Amino acid sequence: MGEHGGVMGVSLAGLGRAKLETKGVAMMAMARERPEAPEPVMPPGFRNFGKPGAANPGDLYAGLDSAWETQTMFAKLARRLAKRHRFKDGVLSDNATNFNPNIPAGYTYFAQFAAHDTIRNSSLTVSLSGAEEDRRNLRERSLLLHTLYGGGPGFSEFLYQVPKKGEGYRTMLRTGPIGKAPANAKPPPKGTCPYPHRDIPRLQQADLSDAVQSGRPDILLPDQRNDDNALVAQVTALFHHIHNAVVTALRALPNMPVSGQSGPKGLYLFENARLVTTALYRSAVRNDLLEKLLLPSVAERYRANGFKPLADVKGLGIPVEFSHAAFRLGHSMVRLSYEFNDEHVGGEGVRDVLRTTSSRRSNKLPPATNWIADWSKFFKIGSADPQFSRRIGPCFNDVMIGNGDFANGLVGPNGLGPLGPAELAKLSAEDRAKLPAANLSGLLLRDLIRGAVGGLLTLDAIVRVLPPGIRKTAPLLVNPNERAKVLRKWLADTDVVFSDEELDHLSTNPPLILWLLFEAAEEANGCSLGTLGSIIIGDVFAAGLSESDDEIESNPMTATLLGLLFPDGAPRTMPGLIKFTAKTLQFENVMPRFLTLPDQIPTA
């Protein structure tokens, strides 16, 4: 029996000499016969924040003692988060007034696109009945626009237009057509011209072995998540246009620089366009998106630190505290409706925004003109204000809380699940009352569940990772007694009745996403992330940018190409990229509008 048998043999033989052995020696023998605790592990491509790999299991959040108790607590917490919230400046979370003047609505979906470029989960558990053993991060490197380019024309040929004559290599990304204008659409203004390809590329291939569906059930994208909703699809189409604008601008150069490799002209053109587009995108992430999202004092720390991580350490993979909590705060920014352009003033409800995709409503695609974004509605481009996102805080819009498209696998009192109709029928009335309400079982509940099974650090464990200088600036975060006091007050300020155990747990050991939502409201009135949310997100992006800086920003070819294309300075923001694209591709007078210039704003 190897070592185990040997230890037992020594122990039994020692019984005859018990008087000669010390208690300490016996304890050492007992210790040798116990198997060593396994090293903590994380799914491939993931780790804990501030750790090169997995943290000690004792530092991980696990909810209450059982899955059933945790689910019951989360059902109540979802009800609490559905209540009206009053921010410190008096603004209420009611959908008619809860807007963030610092973050236009487009950044919600630019952030989602960037998240897809940072992480790609192989699977996502949505039940408390088990951990995520089969999960892995398929995005080996972040912020290099793999979510846009896939393997490039050499490996993902289907993404690209056929080569232009004389170039011998695919260079331009495909775009998809617009459908018919609805009956109530306004007529296009004089002097405008239609441009039919303003969507992601979708198709219906009628001669394959599967049954033919109406509309466009398939998409030509390397990352299917970029059709998760109508607005992230429009942001993806925008980056197709940005890349194509860069190709167009490079073609116009009299002598485009080339690298030392041999190949057709189109190969150099594509590689240069990809390098420039990636550099412009990363600049917009750093100088625009993060400047909007991060607490201003934390953003200043990154600028002073050369945009290097402030608290996290180098490790293999993305912290689960980012993927399962911090970057899910964007869900609280989602509006109830969006006006895509001036042709359709009524706007589109977010439920339809979420469902107008090739996988859900292929019969509604290609998208009609009311689904095509005028980017002046989503980013601050001209003198008129865009639509703004909702404030970040412990409050979600009704659809995000209760949308049935985000169904979750529920567990029963025995902790097993997901519950099917037969199991549900066997529950007592008392137990059924403890289940999450049907109208509160949407994305918010899903985020809470993922945070409980994903192996995230507890809040106190994360605080211990933060440098002393940062802890000094966030007294509520680092003072557990005061933190528990304000959380308990917020939890109790409602008609939702928590048990004493639930109140103690949620106030002293809150789920990370709850704290991050709460601190954004407490520290920034919901107009940015709070301290900890800013650092988790900022450090992940700073690390991703730093790890590939030599390929992009510090690559001499990048500076050469940007200097040739933008002698007055390259755009550093989304509005700047949109204006460059409109001018280069002659989109300034297309319909539906790509952007609205000052002289095109309708007058009363």
Image (cartoon, helix red, strand yellow):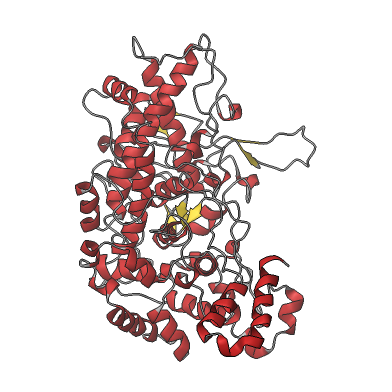
Residue 297: x %, y % from top left: 21, 58
Asked if residue 34 can be seen in this view, the reply is no
- Residue pictured at 51% horizontal, 37% vertical: 199
Asked whether 27 or 446 is in front, the reply is 27
Residue 295: x %, y % from top left: 26, 58
- Residue pictured at 63% horizontal, 71% vertical: 129
Q: Would residue 172 be found to the left or right of residue 342 on screen?
A: right
Q: Dividing the image into 4 quarters, which one contains the N terminus?
A: bottom right
Residue 29: x %, y % from top left: 58, 77
Q: In the displayed structure, would residue 590 be above or below residue 82?
A: above
Q: How many marks?
A: 0
Q: Would residue 592 be found to the left or right of residue 366 on screen?
A: left
Q: Quadrant of residue 144?
A: top left
Q: In the displayed structure, would residue 543 be above or below residue 600?
A: below
Q: Would residue 159 be found to the left or right of residue 580 on screen?
A: right
Q: Would residue 65 be found to the left or right of residue 334 on screen?
A: right
